[in-house]
Amino acid sequence: MDKVAVVGVGNTPFKARHIDKTFPRLAYESVRAAMDDAGAAKEDIQSVVYSIYNDFFEHCMMPDHHIHYLLGHARKPGLRVTTGGATGGYSIRAAFAEVASGLHDVVMVVGVEKVADVANVFEMVKSITFAGDPFFESRLGGSPSGSYAGAIRWHMEHYGTTEEDCARVVVKNKGNARNNPDAQSPMELTVEDVLASPMVVPPLKILDHCLNSEGAATVILASEEAAGRFKREPVWITGIGASTESGRQTERDDVGDSLFPAVKASADAAYRMAGIDDPSSAIKVAEAYDSFSGVEIVLYEEFGFCRRGEGTRFLADGRASMGGSNPVNPSGGLIGGEHAIGATGVYQVAEVVRQIRGEAGARQVPGVDRGLAQSMGGARGAYSVTIVLEG
């Protein structure tokens, strides 16, 4: 298997709405930034993987081939991936496979989402709900928030996690976003501010939720031989793991061992591939899928940064904060930075690459030589991809 490097990254700013830009325009701007970063020409790109989650968002059933043509890649291979919130991670994985197998030397991943072009917020939420089990859970009122809220409540009941603990994740990530010029929602908040926001699905309040964002991100992957053609020092993908769980939570038997079994399986696979035995000491920074505040607390445990039930202590001790042993979401994550679903997993990789390069500006974590990017989607994390990157 060939080694695979990231040789270029780029993204747009993330906003609640880019009212003046179409989804092809957003894609183009992120591609242009990544091409400039790599010193690449259009002719260098042999294949493109498109990370676009939901047709309803773009109001276009096959948005990828429109972008492909407008980018000037007609008649080159183009593949679209859609796996909920894990769309970006699975897209990186698909491109990684093309390069590692020797099928192509240089593959570009383009993630884009145009959420607010739908008729209204109710249509947007309904379109996400369509991903649920249509025969049982959705008919009983299942929702994206509800599927994660149940896991967080289980953690509260068994390990003593509180709503105040969850609010501290929001304070951290909204605060981190203040150091990210591309972040959608940088805010200086207190725990009391979060607790006072309106309840949606107990224990989740509005500020416990991730954002709805528009924007795009692009990553360019290259083989070891091809990496030398580009101007940037390569950042290597040394581990990549993926897992897909049943979308019907009633079919799972995982509670007690892992609240997000797909996450644990994907992380374990990535660590094996990268030769990591002790994640807490090996991983210097993580961009994790904080779809809801309490989810991030559980992810500390799934990643192996701490033992089961110790996520709240990990947070309270400052280990997940800037200056801690394993800073999580210096970009602001999904709560403070962005959640343009198809772009999110791609952007997470771009952010870890910047950390390894030492180019993250005010959000830079000192001495990063290895980082983790993790995305997940579907009911209670039915999909997950974990990616380990090294300088």
Image: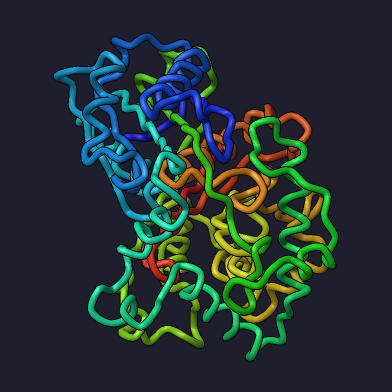
Give the position of the C terminus as an image quadrant.
top right
Q: Please say which color scheme the image uses.
A: rainbow
Farthest-out residue, bottom = 158
Residue at (68%, 61%) from the top-left corner?
207
Residue 381: image quadrant is: bottom left
Left or right placement of residue 300 versus residue 62 in this view: right
Residue 267 to residue 219: above or below: below
Compare residues 391 and 36 and report the one nearer the observer.
36
Query: Residue 221 occupies which quadrant of the picture?
Result: top left
389 or 21: which is nearer to us? 21
In the rendering, at what x and y percent does residue 9 appear?
A: 50, 26
- Which residue shows up at 43% across the image and 16% down it? 228
Please tell me whether residue 321 is drawn above or below residue 231 in the rendered image.
below
Q: Which residue lies furthest to the front in this view?
A: 119
124 sits to left or right of 131 = right
- Between 335 and 21, the residue placed more toward the observer is 21
In this rendering, the answer to whether 341 lies above or below 151 is above
**Which residue sits at x=39%, y=44%?**
118
Image quarter hosting the N terminus = top left
In the rendered image, residue 173, in percent from the top left (x then y), is placed at 71, 52
Q: Residue at x 28, y 28 (%)?
A: 48
Q: How many marks?
A: 0
Residue 96 relative to residue 184: left or right? left
In the displayed structure, 82 sits above or below 127; it is above
Residue 24 position within the rendered picture, expressed as x and y whole percent measured from the top left:
36, 25
- Residue 325 location, x and y as percent? 76, 55
